Structure formats: C-alpha cells, structure tokens
Amino acid sequence: MNRKNLYCFSGLVVMLATITGCGLSGPAVPTVDSSARGTALAATALSFGTATYTTAPTETPIPTPKISVYGTSLIINADQSATFIDHKAGIQLTIPAGWLPIRVNEDEFYKAYSLDVVVQNPAIADRLTTTQSANLDFHRLDAIDIRDGHIPNGIITVINVVFQENDRRSLEDLYKAESRRKKPFFGYKFITANYPYLDDGTRVLQIEEKWDGETGVIYYRGVFFSLPSGAFALDFYTDMDFKDTVLPDFEQVIKSLTLLNP
C-alpha cells in the first residue's frame, strides 16, 4: 500500500514512540504496524434483558458487558449507538448510530467481512485487513462511518481510540513529542494545536493536521487526555472537504466520554 494514503493508527502511539527515538516501531514502546489501517453492529450486540413485572413495572436490566482479554467491552444499544468501555483506561464513551465500531480480533471484527457495506467498499475492507497487525494493548477501537454518501473520494471516516497505560506525562510533554515527530506523509501540513476545556472542565490537547492521500486530502484531528491510568487519545480521520459534515459526530463522542473512577 502506498504510504501516502495511510491513516496513522494514532498520533498518540507515534508520539510515544518518538520520545524513545524509535520512530514508528521500537523496543521501548511497542506500536502497531505502520501499514495498518476500518464491525459489526447488531450481529455482535449484547441483548438487553426484557423487563419483568410483578405488582409494578421494574426497570429494564442493564446488560453485563463481556470484557475482552484486552480489557474492553462493546455494547450495541437499542437506538443502534454503541457503548464502548475501556476498563484499563477507566473510560466509557458512546459511538453514534450509523458508525461501525470494531475491536480487532473480536467477534464483531470477523463478522464485519460479510456485511454488505464492507463487501461493497474496498476502503473499509482494507482497513479491516490491515488492522489485524495492530498492537491491541494500544489500539483499542475503530469506529467507521458507514452511512450512505459518507465515503467521498473513496476516503473513509475513522475514529480511532488509543490508550498508553501508565503514561502520565503532561499534555505539554505529549505535544512536545508530537512537534518533534517527523511526519511521513506527502503534502503534510500542521494546522493548529491548542488546549481547550471540555464542558466538564477537563483540559485536553487538540491537534489538527492534513496530508495528501491518493484520491484526496486527509484531515486529522487528535484529542489527547492525561488520565490517572495513562495517556488516552481519540483520533479522527476523514476527507478534508468532508470534515464539516462529520466533525459533529466526533465532537459528540468526545462529549460522551466519562471516567469510570473519577
């Protein structure tokens, strides 16, 4: 695959590797294969229990999520949104309906290959195939926009969740690492970086970049959190000319993030 058309798995993973001077791979910080790239929704959903009634109605039981060996859970909700829980990171977030959430090598990952939207869109199938080499201690979740008309120029929109356990560097230190990193993309351009506050008062690092793909310009936005459990990032990739259409969904995901043990 041509390197200029890759979506980095994560600015965070690359950033962490850069600190050690090891580039995209190195013994100090294992990373995903730099060529890697994105599952099934209802096919793998955990069923909601049916409410039972005695003399008065009771609340619908909340499903007990199955925790993967890597410490994550994924629940498909009644409205087809998805609740993702990273038990190691200590976070929970919601992926909106219309997106395809996948954890590599879990049931939803394998079942995704038979979905019509994957069969009909080589870019999604390619993402699935190449993410098989991901280091799942870091690469926690992919979510792919599968709505009609949302793959302009053959470029898929991906939200990638990444976590570096026990990395408690400040946001400023993470940004210094990112600014020193050599950008391996044709037409790369840094757009901006800042430290906005979320609605709940959480301060984050936000970075925006772009580079040339084979069929269009790739836009990237990364939002980085310094958590008690480690460094956590939400990465967003899309077609540059399409970003205003899909950025509201990414912002919705950011706003949904809650700490399990605040």
Image (tube, rainbow, N blue to C red):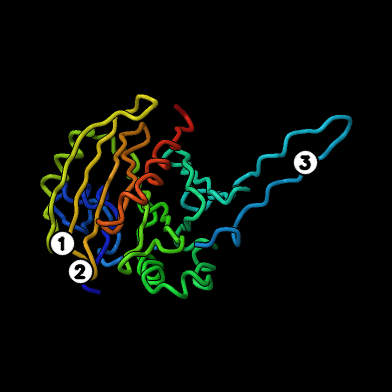
- The local secondary structure at tag 3 comes to loop
Q: Which residue is mark 3?
A: 51
Residue 18 spot, x, y in % from top left: 16, 50
55 displayed left or right of 244: right
Query: Could you say which is closer to the camera, residue 181 or residue 189?
Result: 189
Up/down of 115 relative to 170, above or below:
below
Q: Do the numbered discs 2 and 1 sit on residues whose CB atoms are within 8 Å?
A: yes
Residue at image position (47%, 55%) is: 99
Q: Earlier in the sequence, mark 2 or mark 1?
A: 2
Residue 130 spot, x, y in % from top left: 35, 69
- The local secondary structure at tag 1 comes to loop
Up/down of 180 relative to 35, above or below:
above
Q: Earlier in the sequence, mark 2 or mark 3?
A: 2
Q: Which residue is mark 2?
A: 3
Q: Which residue is mark 1?
A: 185
Label 1 to label 3: alpha-carbon separation: 53 Å
Residue at image position (14%, 61%) is: 184
Can you say which quadrant of the picture contains the N terminus? bottom left
| Amino acid on which disc 1 is placed | Phe
Residue at image position (59%, 59%) is: 44
Quick check: can you spot residue 134?
yes
Label 2 to label 3: alpha-carbon separation: 52 Å
| Amino acid on which disc 3 is placed | Ala
Neighbour tally class for label 3: few under 14, some 14-19, many 20 plus, Cα within 10 Å: few
| Amino acid on which disc 2 is placed | Arg
